[in-house]
Amino acid sequence: MKLFSEINQSETAKRKLKSIAKSSNLDIKLVTLLANYSWDYDPIGRESIGWVKKEQIDQERLSKDIEILYNYLGIDNNLKFDKKYLVEQILSFHKIKNQEELKNKLLISGIEKNYCYLSEYSTYHYLNNVSLEKLELLDSKESYSELEFLKTLFMKIFRGGAVDRYNLLYCYCDLCISLPYVKTHSSQVTKWVEDLISRINKLDDSATLTDLIKNCQGIIKGDKYFKQRVLQSLAYSGDIKVRTINVTNIFIPEFRDVLSSHFYSNEWTYPLRFWNKNE
């Protein structure tokens, strides 16, 4: 087993982390710190080694990096991620989030394949109609560790649009942690959502979820998985209409286990898994 100091030391890993930092609009040092406790990009053949094992982690180094990270993010060093705290913070921040700013981040995410920006938009709309009681039932876990916090932050950077949003710590990272993005974007961003929705509305009744992804061509950057996350986010916000489901009247997490009769549609989240018009 590799030592902790040997994780992400290859040129392959350094190039990958640099690419992630650029698309996420974050400092490479922050991305590398988080990755070192989460995912080892050093290669085995054509693949990355993968998840960092708990036994590899240097506990003394972890304590030092936690202090560095908390100071960098402006977090209280004595903070404990217990359920009561997470619920209160998520509920408070959800109420005051600037929707125009979130929409702008969505627009930028589609142009730059920024998972962080997309994730913040997704989580906000996924939790529409949230309440204290609903949040308390969202996640059965009573507390999270500092190491889990590091890993959750990395997941936001790595695949922010693809994470299960019924994890309280993940929702907290999206709504309550202000990541120090490197550059400030212009408020004049291409308004591509309207063009995409116009294309979707013109699809006939035989169209499938695969056709939704095809309609992103030339509008949204990224691979098919990123485009799928964008489409799911637009369904959370109600921009993409899904048959008889009105997301303005429901708390989406309560329906996450409601499955489509089409097996492969369940690779998509609710409500978009029910988009097929011929179901």
Image (spheres, grey):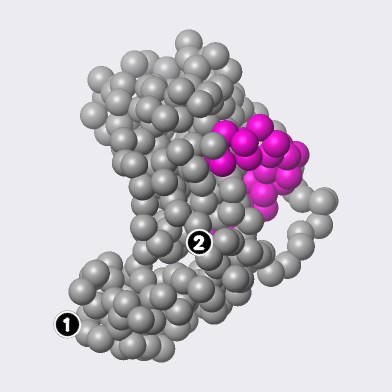
Residue interval drawn in magenta: 89-115
Query: Residue 17 in magenta?
Result: no
- Image quarter (top left, top right, bottom left or bottom right) of the N terminus: bottom left
Q: Where is residue 158 in the image (x, y as percent from the top left)?
A: 44, 61
Q: Which of marks 2 and 1 is in front?
A: 2
Count of number-bearing discs: 2
- Mark 2 lies on residue: 78
In the picture, measured across the screen, residue 239 lies left or right of residue 171, that is: right
Q: Is mark 2 on a helix, strand or loop?
A: loop
Q: Residues within 10 Å of mark 2 (few under 14, many from 20)?
A: few
Query: Residue 92 in magenta?
Result: yes
- Numbered badge on residue 1: 1
- Image quarter (top left, top right, bottom left or bottom right) of the C terminus: top left
Which picture quadrant has residue 183? bottom right
Q: Is mark 1 on a helix, strand or loop?
A: loop
Q: Where is residue 229 in the image (x, y as percent from the top left)?
A: 47, 44
Question: Which residue sits at x=54%, y=48%?
Answer: 174
Which picture quadrant has residue 122? top right
Q: What kind of residue is marked 2? A: Asn
Q: Position of residue 181 (x, y in %)?
A: 66, 64
- Numbered badge on residue 212: none
Q: What predominant SS class does the magenta segment belong to?
A: helix
Q: Which residue lies furthest to the top in this view?
A: 244
Q: Position of residue 149 (x, y in %)?
A: 42, 58
Instruction: Choose the circle earlier in sequence order: 2 or 1.
Output: 1
Distance in Å between CA atoms under marks 2 and 1: 32 Å
In the picture, measured across the screen, residue 208 lies left or right of residue 55, that is: right
Q: What kind of residue is marked 1? A: Met
